[in-house]
Image (spheres, rainbow, N blue to C red):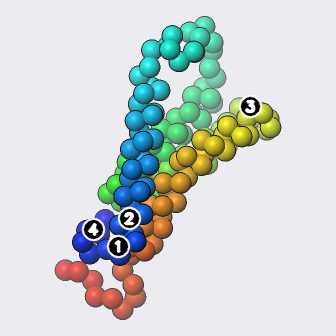
Amino acid sequence: MPEDSNSNPSAVILRWIARGISLVILVVVLLITFMSPSESGASATELVAPIEWAALGMYGLSVVGLLVAWRWERLGALLALLGVIGHDVLFYLAKGFQPAYLAGNLIIAMIFLLPACLYVIDWWMSRPQVGEAQPA
């Protein structure tokens, strides 16, 4: 990751916006993960298919990607994007296409896609231009 002092000022702003959104996502995910089952409304008697666990794990990959992007924007954004795409593919394999789930999945996907896209734009703006001197 380029140092903030050597980067395009617009890229630095985008980077910190993406980091802020990533932190909010991380806090929400941690709160959901560590909430007691009685507070989350989940029933302990409901069985969850392995493919549904895998689909949920893809959002875990997205969270890891957003954290990796703090250091390596392009790699982290790619992981986050793969997590969202992987979730959607596995979800629709498990449940089939059901319009009732479409809006919810799109909202969650957009939450992860926003900072991932900002990290990609930041990386693009921060990369060295052709003919530009590379720092030693």
Mark earlier in primary sequence (4, 1): 4
> What residue does disc 3 label?
95
Nearer to us: label 3 or label 4: 4
Q: Is residue 93 left or right of residue 32?
A: right
Residue 31: mark in rendering: none
Going by the numbered disc 3, the residue's amino acid type is: Lys
Say the numbered circle drawn on residue 13.
2
Callout 3 touching callout 4 (CB < 8 Å): no
Would you say 56 lies left or right of 63 here? Answer: right
* Nearer the camera: disc 4 or disc 1: 1
Would you say the residues marked 2 and 1 are in contact, meaning their CB atoms lie under 8 Å apart? yes
Give whichever of discs 3 and 4 has the lower sequence position. 4
Q: Is residue 32 left or right of residue 53?
A: left
Q: Residue at x 42, y 47 (%)?
A: 22
Return the residue at label 4.
Answer: 4
* The quadrant where residue 132 appears: bottom left
First in sequence: mark 3 vs mark 1:
1
Query: x, y percentage for residue 124?
Result: 45, 72
State left or right for residue 48 relative to residue 15. Answer: right
**How far across and down, in percent of the image, does residue 4 sit?**
27, 68
The answer for how far apart the CA atoms under marks 3 and 4 are is 44 Å
Q: Residues within 10 Å of mark 2 (few under 14, many from 20)?
A: some
Circle 1 residue: 9
Residue that extends furthest to the left in the rendered view of this protein: 136
Q: Residue furthest top?
A: 45
| 81 w.r.t. 57: above or below | below
Q: CA distance from mark 2 to mark 1?
A: 6 Å
Q: Say if 71 sits above or below 48 in the image.
A: below
**In x, y percent, where is residue 88?**
65, 43
Quadrant in the rendering for residue 54: top right
